[in-house]
Image (cartoon, rainbow, N blue to C red):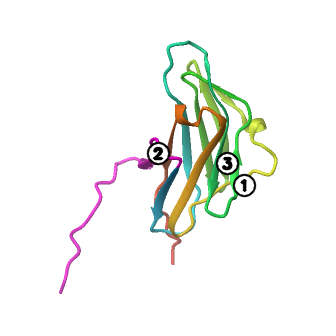
Amino acid sequence: GITGAFHFPFPESDAPFPLGVYATNDTFSIVNDGDETGFTLRIEALPSDIPQEVVAVTPTIYNENDEYLQIKGDILTGDVITITTKTGNKTVTLTRNGVDSNILNRLVSGSTWLTLKEGTNTFRVEAVRGVKKLRVTLMHRNSYLGV
């Protein structure tokens, strides 16, 4: 018989790990081999020479069906916004100057808690301004429903 030898070296912890990193393009795709699942999205403001500079405003993540998740307001140099869309653990956190704060109130009305559907998922990143000054990382683990 044939034995599969292809494998990924999974980390020991249950923490999500990056499977795709968005660079300078405005769209990125990620393949979910498991069942539909939530994910963690990290939006990081790239460094600037001006401390506390507003580098981007109101980032929005769209899926291929034009459903979106939008965070209103300014993003300053060094800010990291972490969005988790997992069932039972939906959070929006801003880390600024080493301090975490809940910014769920900055989630724009009409936003959808986006998920990774089975198969290929394509996302688009936009912002009122400064989209090129953001690094977006999507992290997830394939999840399979028990049988």
Which label number is shown at residue 22?
2
Instruction: Give the mark nearer the N terminus: 2 vs 3.
Output: 2
Quarter assignment of residue 55: top right
Amino acid under disc 2: Tyr
Residue closest to the eye, 46 or 143? 46
Foreground mark, 3 or 1?
Answer: 1
The structure residue drawn at horizontal position 62% and vertical position 44%, both measured from the top left corner, is: 126
Which label number is shown at residue 112?
1
Foreground mark, 2 or 3?
Answer: 2
Report if residue 13 lies within the magenta region. yes
Amino acid under disc 1: Thr
In the image, which residues are magenta?
Answer: 1-26
Identify the residue at the far left of this view: 1
Amino acid under disc 3: Lys
Quarter assignment of residue 42: top right
* Residue at mark 3: 90
* Residue count near mark 1 (Cα–Cα under 10 Å), binned few <14, some 14–19, many ≥20: some
Q: Position of residue 129 (x, y in %)?
A: 65, 33
Q: Left of 143 or right of it: where is 108?
A: right
Please identify the quadrant where the N terminus is shown: bottom left
